[in-house]
Image (cartoon, rainbow, N blue to C red):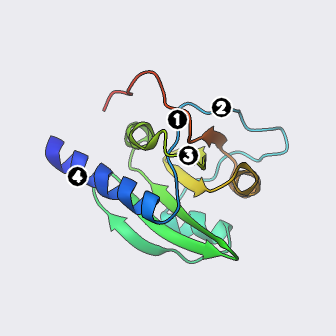
Amino acid sequence: MRRRHSEVLAVALLGGVLAGCSGAEPEPTSSPSPSVSPPVTGTVEQIASRLDCTPEIRIQAEELRQGMCGTGDALFAVTTFPADKFRDVWLYEAAGFGGWYVVGPGWTVSASTKDQATIRQKKLGGALVDGSVVPKTRPPS
């Protein structure tokens, strides 16, 4: 199981890097602003539909499910997790690659820039996470 978990994380990270997506720190660098609604919940498809896209599912595993979306000139990943602990480990492993994430309960949505992340945050709620910041400690898995 440990090896499978590492393989899934490696595939997810590689998919994010190849798609121009980036990693993030598990702890938000900013909390939701008052104009941001409470975070949404749901499947990859439900979250993606709030962003006006239909995802192409790329990864479907026990620890995560990821779909790629494209709207306009932006390609991004919508990733859901069965528990926040998987999300936190995934974000930790992806940290340092750059970019931004919108992070909610059981999900992340990637963004190349802070402006793109802020637009997605307004539609989804959640917190912004700077993917260039490497956390000091690894979350428990």
- As measured in the structure, the alpha-carbon distance from the residue carrying label 3 to the one carrying label 4 is 21 Å
Quarter of the rendering containing residue 98: top right
What residue appears at the point 62 percent right and 71 percent down from the top-left corner? 49
Residue 53: x %, y % from top left: 62, 75
Q: Earlier in the sequence, mark 4 or mark 2?
A: 4
In the rendered image, residue 117, in percent from the top left (x then y), is placed at: 69, 52
The residue under label 2 is which amino acid type? Thr
- 138 left or right of 22 in image: left
Q: CA distance from mark 3 to mark 1?
A: 10 Å
The residue lying at 70 percent from left, 48 percent from top is 125
Who is closer to the viewer here, 84 or 112?
112
Give the number of the mark in front: 3 or 2.
Answer: 3
Q: Nearer the viewer, mark 3 or mark 1?
A: 3
Q: Quick one: SS at disc 2?
A: loop
**Residue 98: which disc?**
3
Q: Residues within 10 Å of mark 4 (few under 14, many from 20)?
A: few
Q: Secondary structure at mark 1?
A: loop
Q: Are the two marked residues, 3 and 2, in contact with CB atoms closer than 8 angstroms?
A: no
Element type where label 3 sits in the image: loop
Circle on res. 29: 2
Near mark 1 (Cα within 10 A), the count class, few <14, some 14-19 or many ≥20, is: many
The residue where tag 1 is placed is: 25
Residue 1 showing in the rendered view: no
Which one is in front, 78 or 74?
Answer: 74
Q: Residue 71 is drawn in which quadrant?
A: bottom right
Q: Amino acid at mark 1?
A: Glu
